[in-house]
Image: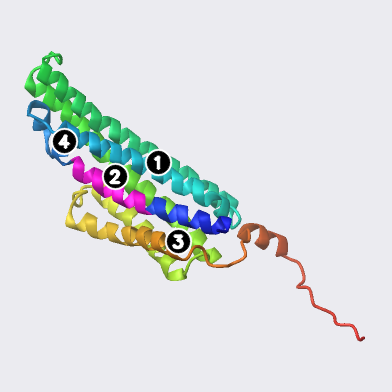
């Protein structure tokens, strides 16, 4: 298997992992995100731990996509490729902060159940609400704002380089700005983060990542010679176009 084909396959698998673990983590977190009563009730700690493990895999896969694609993308535009890797690292870091906040709610519940918390139920619920709010904001910043930005960068690189069919890249060019706009609407209270409007705005990004993943796994990159677009534009600016001269035999 050619190195670029292997890179495409690994990247495609990692993109699928990000989708599966993101959905799985949010579903498993259900009990702890529903309200502050979790900390004073029986809880579902095992389920929440599975959700945390799922999101840890999500963070690892997010970093993995950036690192895996960098050798290919840097041949197109090194600065943008490095920016994509940094954005993926930032997204993963924000996700990890959200994981810590949810696990802290579980610890608070266990301490309260054992009497080690030393606080009344109202105080414990207040702290739990703050931790859940922190998770909700990390979800807004990481898998919304930052995801939209890195989607736009990757889609632009793939569109310019023609490493994948252009309709695939266009999904990212549409989905990235749209999810950023949706996150802005959530930030200003236009609608809730988990709502029909929010889910609808996230559909193009979901379609982009799934379509890109399937394409990379099934076909790999299109056979286009990798070119540093910025370097090529700079090197050829102001130079005459060479003309082939044929000599008589």
SS type, badge 4: helix
* Front position in the image: 85 or 107: 107
SS type, badge 1: helix
Name the spot of residue 94 as percent of width and height, x first.
35, 38
Inspect the magenta stretch and tell me whether residue 25 lies in it.
yes
- Residue wearing tag 1: 60
The residue segment tinted magenta is 16-29
Q: Quadrant of the N terminus?
A: bottom right
SS type, badge 2: helix
The CA span between labels 1 and 3 is: 19 Å
* Residue 68 appearing in the image: yes
Name the spot of residue 153 as percent of width and height, x first.
47, 55
Query: Is disc 4 in contact with disc 1, using a CB cutoff of under 8 Å?
Result: no
Name the spot of residue 234 as percent of width and height, x first.
68, 59
SS type, badge 3: helix
Side of 161 relative to 192 (left or right): right
The CA span between labels 4 and 1 is: 23 Å
Q: Quadrant of the C terminus?
A: bottom right
Kindly identify the residue that appears in the image at 57 percent across and 67 percent down.
223
- Residue wearing tag 2: 140
Residue 32: image tag: 4
Going from the N terminus, do you reach mark 4 or mark 3 first? Answer: 4
Q: Residues within 10 Å of mark 4 (few under 14, many from 20)?
A: many
Going from the N terminus, do you reach mark 4 or mark 1 first? Answer: 4
Going from the N terminus, do you reach mark 3 or mark 2 first? Answer: 2
Asked if 244 appears above or below 237 in the picture, the reply is: below
* Residue 138 appearing in the image: no
Kindly identify the residue that appears in the image at 77 percent across and 71 percent down.
240
Asked if 6 appears above or below 146 in the picture, the reply is: below
The CA span between labels 1 and 2 is: 19 Å
């Amino acid at each position: 298997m050619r190195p670029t084909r292997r890179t495409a396959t690994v990247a495609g698998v990692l993109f699928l992992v990000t989708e599966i673990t993101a959905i799985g983590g949010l579903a498993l977190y259900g009990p702890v995100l529903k309200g502050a009563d979790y900390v004073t009730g029986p809880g579902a700690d095992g389920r929440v731990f599975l959700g945390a493990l799922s999101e840890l895999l999500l963070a690892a896969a997010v970093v993995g996509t950036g690192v895996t694609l960098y050798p290919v993308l840097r041949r197109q535009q090194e600065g943008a490729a490095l920016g994509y890797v940094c954005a993926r690292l930032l997204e993963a870091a924000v996700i990890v902060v959200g994981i810590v906040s949810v696990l802290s709610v579980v610890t608070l519940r266990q301490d309260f159940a054992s009497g080690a918390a030393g606080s009344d139920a109202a105080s414990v619920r207040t702290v739990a609400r703050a931790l859940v709010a922190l998770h909700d904001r990390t979800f807004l910043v990481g898998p919304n704002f930052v995801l939209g930005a890195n989607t736009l960068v990757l889609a632009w690189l793939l569109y310019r380089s023609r490493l994948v069919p252009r309709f695939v890249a266009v999904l990212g060019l549409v989905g990235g700005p749209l999810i950023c706009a949706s996150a802005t609407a959530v930030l200003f209270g236009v609608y809730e983060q988990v709502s029909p409007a929010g889910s609808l705005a996230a559909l193009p990004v979901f379609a982009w990542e799934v379509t890109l993943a399937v394409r990379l796994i099934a076909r790999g990159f299109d056979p286009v010679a990798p070119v540093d677009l910025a370097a090529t534009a700079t090197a050829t600016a102001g130079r005459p176009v060479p003309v082939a001269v044929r000599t008589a035999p």
